[in-house]
Amino acid sequence: MRFPSFIIFYLFFLSGLIKYGQALDGQPQLQWEIGEELKYQVKWTFVKLGEIKLQVVQSDSLHSRSVYHCRVTIDSSPELFFIDLHDVYESYIDAEEYYSHLFRSREKKGDHQLFTQLEYLPDLKVVRIHQEKQHPIKEVEVILDSTIKVTGKIQDTLSLLFLARAMAKLQIQTNLEVMIYSKFENTFLHTYGVPEVIGWANQRISAYPLNGQLKFVGLAGVKDRYHGWFSIDEQSVPLKANMKAFIGNVKIELKEWKNWKAKKDTF
């Protein structure tokens, strides 16, 4: 049973692509911080389901563009002995426009590891998709190796999260087309550009809200409306999120961090 995999919804949708290029009212901005490490606790009612760790690993370059290598690690709680979830997702994200150049994921699936790679080739306007089962004893089994044409830049799960961080201070209402299970579906995204007071870490602080609505049933039954809040400093750190899944309401909250250079007046 792998129901905690819905915690990746916090990163929007696994192995998803977004048609990038909707008009934005203002310029998305984010202060990148190499070495940033954010640890989140995921809970359903009073049950701790697991943890998410988000990292900005290093700067790099791809396709003659400056990028940041980012990583997310998802681990189920060791107290839940019937669940064994240890997945890693990595993305090379454009430093200025927040689209994805290269995405890789490694997910534990029973007796094997599922490896996925999405590589965006801007000159050709295609995405190369490679997926394989990696068994500890058997030979590697390639299950998908193809290319798809795209009309513009793409988003993966991680780059979309950083794009949302960059847009948090803007006033935006937009429908995004998300590629799920080889077809495009819609989700609605709304950022207000005005902070509100929320409860976080036993404090009352100001944070920029974001909400939206899935117009389809996503991975592991994630559906309907979602809400998130970002810090008011230049790093726009995701503080917490609420969402619905087939088991009920789920809460994700930032518990530990490194290299978050928040201003004192943030708190």
Image (cartoon, rainbow, N blue to C red):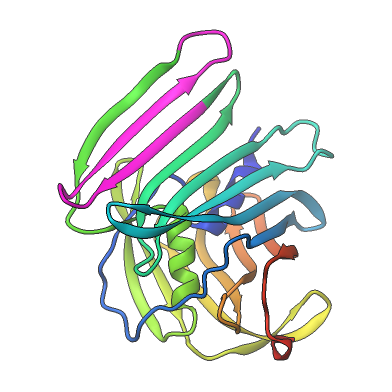
Residue 122, how many percent across, how many down?
A: 21, 52
Query: What residue is rendered at 63% in x and 67% in y?
Result: 241
Task: Give the camera-side residue of 147 and 260.
Answer: 260
Q: How many numbered discs sit on the rendered protein?
A: 0
**Observer able to see residue 131:** yes
Quadrant holding the C terminus: bottom right
Q: Is residue 201 left or right of residue 145?
A: right
Question: Does the magenta segment cover residue 68?
Answer: no
Please tell me whether residue 183 is drawn above or below residue 261 in the rendered image: above
Residue 195, how many percent across, how many down?
A: 58, 89
Please tell me whether residue 247 is drawn above or below residue 264 in the rendered image: above
User: Where does the magenta region start and end?
Assistant: 114-139
Residue 172, how many percent across, how many down?
A: 38, 82
Q: Is residue 86 left or right of residue 225?
A: right
Quadrant holding the N terminus: top right
Residue 242, how many percent across, how many down?
A: 63, 66
Query: What residue is rendered at 69% in x and 62% in y?
Result: 251
Task: Give the camera-side residue of 242 and 130.
Answer: 130
Please tell me whether residue 136 is drawn above or below residue 18 in the rendered image: above
Q: Write down the quadrant of residue 10 in the picture.
A: bottom right
Query: What residue is rendered at 55% in x and 50% in y?
Result: 71
Task: Give the camera-side residue of 61 and 17.
Answer: 61
**Observer able to see residue 218:** no
Dominant secondary structure, magenta: strand
